[in-house]
Amino acid sequence: MPDTLIGLQDWYSSQCDGAWEHSYGIQIGTLDNPGWRVRIDLERTSVVDLPFERVEVHNSERDWLVCWVEDRQFHAACGSHNLIQSLDVFLRWSET
């Protein structure tokens, strides 16, 4: 888990150029089912045009994950214990 958070911090920091962070960023919130939602702005980043194949994992009612790219944003929705997994999907993709 610490590697994932360090990786996300590093990715965010590398986007901050004095302008990007004023209009774009990362949002992590909760869902009421319960779960997490993630939105990461891709505009003006090196991955904005990188193809992304939708990821869907449905192991159980509480162990699930869906990741997709839409409108120049990475999105994830996942179960209450899958936040790190969703961030790992983003980081693996963004490092390709």
Image (tube, helix red, strand yellow):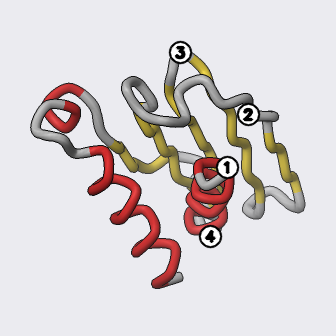
Q: Secondary structure at mark 2?
A: loop
Q: Position of residue 80 (x, y in %)?
A: 59, 63
Left or right of 87 on screen, residue 28: left
Q: Which residue is mark 3?
A: 71
Of labels 4 and 2, the one closer to you: 2
Q: Is residue 30 left or right of residue 71?
A: left
**Eye-nearest disc, 3 or 4:** 3
What amino acid type is highlighted by mark number 2? Phe
The residue tagged 2 is: 52
Q: Which is more foreground, mark 1 or mark 4?
A: 1
Query: Mark 4 or mark 3, which is nearer the start of the sequence?
Result: 3
Q: Which mark is residue 81?
A: 4
Q: CA distance from mark 3 to mark 2?
A: 12 Å
Circles 4 and 2, Cβ within 8 Å, touching? The answer is no
Q: Secondary structure at mark 4?
A: loop
The reply, left or right, for residue 5 in relation to residue 61 is: left
The type of residue carrying mark 3 is: Asp
Tell me residue 66's x, y (percent).
Answer: 73, 43
Query: Is there a contact, CB below 8 Å, between mark 3 and mark 2?
Result: no
Q: Give the percent coordinates (x, y) of residue 60.
A: 86, 60
Please tell me which of labels 1 and 4 falls first in the chain. Answer: 4
Who's the residue at 73% across and 33% down the image?
52
Q: Residues within 10 Å of mark 2 (few under 14, many from 20)?
A: some
Point 80% across, 56% down: residue: 61
Rendered image quadrant of residue 15: top left
Disc 1: which residue: 93
Q: Left or right of 74: which side holds 61?
A: right
Task: Determine whether the residue tagged by mark 1 lies in a helix, strand or loop.
Answer: helix
Is 50 drawn above or below residue 38 in the view shown? above
